[in-house]
Amino acid sequence: MTKVRRIGVVTGSRAEYGLLHRLLCEIEASDLLELQLIVTGTHLSDRHGRTVDEIEADGHVISARVDMELKGDGPAELTKAMGRALIGLADVFERLAPDIVVVLGDRYEILAAAEAAMLARLPIAHIHGGEASEGQIDEAIRHAISKMAHYHFVAAEPYRTRVIQMGEDPQRVFNVGAPGLDPIMDADVMSFAEAMSSIDFQPRMPLFLVTYHPVTLRKGTAADAHALLEALDAFPQASIIFTGTNADTDGDEITKLIDAYVKARPDRVMQIASFGRKRYLSVLTGADLVIGNSSSGIIEAPAVGTPTINIGVRQQGRLRAPSVIDCEESARAIRVAIERGLSSEFQAMASARETPYGRGGASVKMARLLETLPLENVLMKKFHTIDQGLEITS
């Protein structure tokens, strides 16, 4: 009789949970896998929308909660929170004893999960490795997790090449595409009208969906949010929905600026800490522009046909669809980019939904791999050396 594999999946934020949800469903539906869902990070924070409630509303059984006690967004506070996550996850892995730990992305709480799994001598599967976000601390965290991981589920072929370039065995690196595209390709979203009704907002058109996070490798990035808000004021005819800011350094200061902006324009501007998975995708689809510096504007927005105004260096280094407009963090540059994105020509081009991140199905591919990949004798890794011609073979 085939042994059922215990799959420990760690989630720490609303955005990453949205990418993991379909994989969680696939694991739960498999006769060969048992889901052990471990929740930490902003999911357990009232200040960030307490999105653990959404996870439970989706019907997922939570195996463990690790409260990082997010008390502030300064470097010292976040370092201490990461330490609390490491301690809590050590206890969880000892108790649950998963056969493999699955982590996604590049957040500091996910680094703590990878560290705890590594020290517990548990195999690690890493999703979305090999990417670049050169304005972020996340850049170093992502690559560090890749070196701890034993299997890699990447979103595009250039990212597979990069992971192998880091010395990882090509036979353990799989290009599955971006899991965030799965619900989009399957049309697993509520209607735009339902989404607006659920938040009691009747938008004018055009509608801007704005998400602006701190650039963590640069001090004082909250000042750049002023330029964004100034640029938005050049479009008084538009409705604007802001989504919540990450629990990163300067995040609270940016949130305060946005709060004040929203309160001064209650007739056409609103802020919501967390839309929830389905509602966010419907708003993303119905918006005329996605504005800010979130990875969602790089990966998901092109797949639904919504143009993106990507501000600054936070996502520098990621693969781009032609519907992404990059601009500097100045009011004038942002305004010019918005005008271009609203043009009928650019809107028509974006409607082609061209994306470098696949056409969906990533979650099914990952679940099948988790059912069959060898888990014995995988902890000791050899550095895969590429020849001088940098030719990479499978």
Image (cartoon, rainbow, N blue to C red):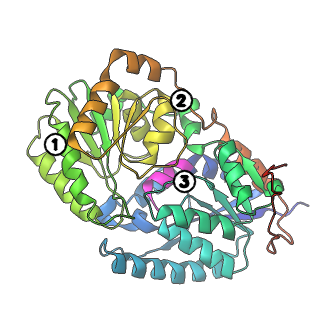
> Residue at (21%, 41%) from the top-left corner?
331
Q: Is residue 219 left or right of residue 114?
A: left
Rendered view: 321 above or below 375: above
Residue ID for mark 1: 230
Q: Is residue 109 visible?
A: yes
Name the mark on residue 187: 2
Q: Residues within 10 Å of mark 2 (few under 14, many from 20)?
A: some
Q: Residues within 10 Å of mark 1 (few under 14, many from 20)?
A: some
> Residue at (59%, 38%) from the top-left corner?
182
Q: Is residue 172 left or right of residue 256?
A: right
Q: Which residues are magenta?
A: 10-19
The residues bearing labels 1 and 2 have C-alpha atoms spaced at a distance of 35 Å
Q: Is residue 18 magenta?
A: yes
Q: For the residue labelled by badge 2, is the local secondary structure a helix, a strand or a loop?
A: loop
Residue 90: x and y, percent?
59, 82
Residue ID for mark 3: 132
Residue at the front extreme?
A: 388
Rendered view: 245 above or below 288: below
Q: Of the residues shown, which amino acid type is indicated by label 2?
A: Ala
Q: Quadrant of residue 77?
A: bottom left
Q: Earlier in the sequence, mark 1 or mark 2?
A: 2
Q: For the residue labelled by badge 1, is the local secondary structure a helix, a strand or a loop?
A: helix
Q: Is residue 336 magenta?
A: no
Mark in the foreground, 2 or 3? 3
Query: Which part of the image, by quadrant, shows the N terminus?
Result: bottom right
Residue at the right extreme?
A: 1
